[in-house]
């Protein structure tokens, strides 16, 4: 099975308790299980990780680049200002998808800009946890073509 790395950034480990009116009531563990189960149905081996550390996220992207592993990334707030993540993500030669649970364009002004959007294969946002399901389908389709 083809490996896909799902990376979640700062504060996403608090899913289920952090602003459930915006991010939903699903916990990070439940999200990880949904991603793994969806991946299995699509023939993908999904590895889900979360860190509040920008340095750890960069290291995981380097790992994905070296292994030519597809990446689904929810960088959280780092989406809007982390050029280190952007530069690491730009090195990944496999499909990459930027994911957000909410729709950043419909929220505060500072969330309207994504510094990583220009280096990913595509972006999916605003569909809650289903954003990840859609991203996994997009990666599977891209890998199959």
Image (spheres, helix red, strand yellow):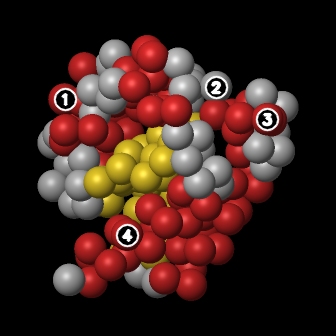
Left or right: residue 112 versus residue 33 is left
The image quadrant that residue 73 belongs to is top left
Q: CA distance from mark 1 to mark 3?
A: 32 Å
Left or right: residue 107 versus residue 65 is right
Report the quarter where the N terminus lies.
Answer: bottom left
Left or right: residue 4 versus residue 16 is left
Q: Nearer the viewer, mark 2 or mark 4?
A: 4
- Which residue bears the numbered disc 2? 11
Question: Residue 85 placed where, x, y %?
Answer: 30, 28
Q: CA distance from mark 1 to mark 4?
A: 22 Å
Question: Residue 59 placed where, x, y %?
Answer: 34, 32
What residue is rendered at 19% in x and 29% in y? 87
Of the residues under marks 1 and 3, which one precedes in the sequence? 3
Residue 138, numbered circle: 4
Of the residues under marks 1 and 4, which one precedes in the sequence? 1
Question: Residue 76 placed where, x, y %?
Answer: 51, 29
């Amino acid at each position: 099975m083809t490996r896909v790395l799902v990376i979640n950034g700062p504060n996403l480990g608090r899913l289920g308790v952090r602003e459930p009116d915006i991010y939903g009531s699903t916990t990070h563990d439940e999200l990880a299980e949904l991603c793994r189960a969806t991946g299995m149905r699509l023939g993908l081996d999904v590895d889900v990780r979360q860190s509040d550390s920008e340095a750890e996220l960069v290291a995981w992207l380097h790992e994905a680049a070296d292994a030519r592993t597809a990446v689904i990334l929810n960088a959280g707030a780092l989406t809007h200002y982390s050029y280190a993540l952007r530069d690491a993500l730009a090195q990944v030669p496999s499909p990459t998808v930027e994911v957000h649970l909410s729709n950043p364009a419909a929220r505060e002004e500072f969330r309207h800009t994504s510094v990583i959007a220009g280096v990913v294969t595509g972006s999916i946002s605003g569909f809650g946890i289903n954003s990840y399901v859609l991203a996994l389908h997009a990666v599977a389709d891209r890998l199959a073509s």
